[in-house]
Image (cartoon, rainbow, N blue to C red):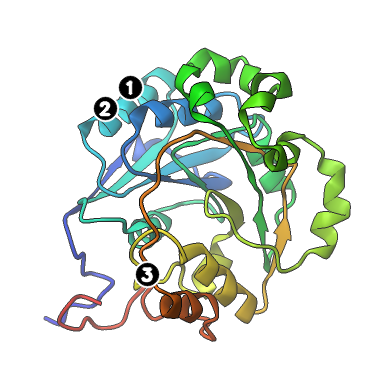
Amino acid sequence: MTVTCDEYVSSPMRVEDSQPLAWSAPAISLVIAVYQRPALLELVLASLEVQTFTNFEVVLADDGSGEEVRELVERWVVRTGHRVRHVWQENTGFRKTIICNRAVARARAPYLVFIDGDCILHHRFLERHFLRRRPGQALSGRRVMFDLPLTARLRVEDVTSLYVERPSAWWRHVKSHDRRNGIFLPAAFGLRGGYSTRYGILGSNYSLFRSDFLSVNGYDERIIGRGLEDDNLRRRLLNAGLVVRALSQEAIQYHCHHEHSGFPHDAAAVVRWRETRETHTPHGVTRPPCSGDGH
């Protein structure tokens, strides 16, 4: 039997559903890129409990976390009754492109919102992404970068009470250029979002129709290691004729502090992936017949 790349998985992967047979189709699939850091993920999950827009499913794109994350998600599902699809792959390094594509392949909604597992959401975050959605466009917001002292003392109650959204709570704990990103000002979309059609995509805060994501075949899985995956996706979306509009100061999120791994790409890779002329990657959600290495 010929094995195609659609059937091929380069490492063990599992999908765990909460009440899959009872689900009705949601309006949004919220794809959360996760790797470890269960304490931060708990804050993110808490922010989902206070969303004004509630017709969504959670799809965890888990790049090899341990049992602590799985147990946290199970407890959260039991406590909230929320629907979650946990897509997990073995930890063999930073492979966000691969696990996010697998998560999208299992998402049920026509509209996709992407965040990271360390970004707390403003209570109107999903509402604003959904309200501004249009076929043929992606929406990209920004984030408020918290420092370590504030991150270390945050508790679930700070999120569910909306305390974390008060500028007085974080003003002294973020850099001056980030403060604007924490001011909820949806009226600005008419100026910024209406005219910026080539805005940069931030992987922790963007959305688009699933059909538009699939039109370019999602993330390019040849990009391994942190960085460039969002730049490459943006370029291919633009090559396909889509626009990217700004949703900053509207779809607000608060990024918890943590250390980052290094940037593993050389100058040639930066140019190759950022300036690609491709539209539909052959190494995305669906793949051609496998070569010897599975790609």
Question: Is 256 on the left or on the right of 66, as rendered?
Answer: right
Q: Nearer the viewer, residue 110 or 195?
A: 195
The quarter holding residue 103 reads bottom left
**What residue is shown at x 25% (from left), y 47% (from top)?**
64
**What residue is shown at x 22% (from left), y 81% (from top)?**
290
Q: Earlier in the sequence, mark 3 or mark 1?
A: 1
Mark 2: secondary structure: helix
Using a 10 Å C-alpha cutoff, classify the residue at mark 2 as few (fewer than 14 neighbours), some (14 to 19) or many (20 or more).
Answer: few
* 141 vs 269: above or below: above
Q: Which residue was labeled with disc 3?
A: 223
> Can residue 230 be seen at all in this image of the molecule?
yes
Q: Quadrant of the N terminus?
A: bottom left
Q: Which residue was labeled with disc 2?
A: 71
* 119 vs 50: above or below: below
Mark 3: secondary structure: loop
Q: Contact, CB < 8 Å: mark 2 with mark 1?
A: yes
**Looking at numbered disc 3 in the image, what kind of residue is underneath it?**
Ile
**Looking at numbered disc 1 in the image, what kind of residue is underneath it?**
Arg
Q: Contact, CB < 8 Å: mark 3 with mark 2?
A: no
> Can residue 240 be seen at all in this image of the molecule?
no
The quarter holding residue 245 reads bottom right
The residues tagged by marks 2 and 1 sit, at their Cα atoms, a distance apart of 6 Å
**What residue is shown at x 42% (from left), y 24% (from top)?**
81
Q: Which residue was labeled with disc 1?
A: 75
Question: Is 38 on the left or on the right of 90, as rendered?
Answer: right
Residue that extends furthest to the left in the rendered view of this protein? 1
**Looking at numbered disc 2 in the image, what kind of residue is underneath it?**
Glu
